[in-house]
Amino acid sequence: QVQLVESGGGLVQAGGSLRLSCAASGSTFSINVMAWYREAPGKQRELVASINSGGSTAYTDSVKGRFTISRDNAENTVALQMSSLKPEDTAVYYCYARRVGSGSYWGQGTQVTVSS
C-alpha cells in the first residue's frame, strides 16, 4: 500500500501563487507515475499534471505555462507550483500515484480557492 498526504492548499486572490506538496509513504518502490488531479463542484475529476519516474511531464491545456509539476524520487514527493491562478482553478486537488503492476493510490485532497 501507498499513503499519500497533500499539503499547501488554501485561499488566494486571482493572479497569486500556491505550492502544493504530496509525500508518499509505505510501499513506494516501483511508483512510476505521480500526478495531480482536481475536482471542482459539479465537475468530473480531471488530470492537471503528471510526471513519470524519468521526469517527463504532461499538463492539461488550461494550466500550461502557469503550473509546474516536479518530483523528488529519493524523497518520494511531488509538488505542484501554481502561478497566475484564476478563479476557475478553484477545486479540491488530489495527489495520485501509480505503481507498476499494483494499482493506483489517491491522497485525501486539499482545497484550493481562488477569489476574484
Image (cartoon, grey):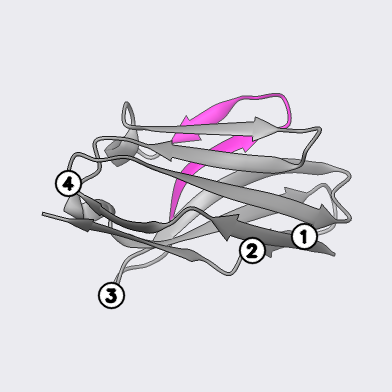
The range drawn in magenta is 46-59
Give the label on residue 103, or none. 1
Q: Say few, some or many: other residues with alpha carbon within 10 Å of mark 1 (under 14 / 14 to 19 / 20 or more).
A: few
Question: What amino acid is at disc 1?
Answer: Gly
- Residue annotated with mark 2: 106
Q: Secondary structure at mark 3?
A: loop
Q: CA distance from mark 2 to mark 3?
A: 20 Å
Return the x and y of residue 113 as percentages of the image width and height. 28, 60
Of labels 2 and 1, the one closer to you: 2
Compare residues 34 and 84 and report the one nearer the observer: 84
Q: Which residue sits at x=37%, y=59%?
A: 10
Q: Which residue sits at x=52%, y=60%?
A: 94
Q: Say few, some or many: other residues with alpha carbon within 10 Å of mark 2 (under 14 / 14 to 19 / 20 or more).
A: many
Q: CA distance from mark 1 to mark 4?
A: 36 Å
Give the label on residue 79, or none. none
- Residue annotated with mark 3: 42
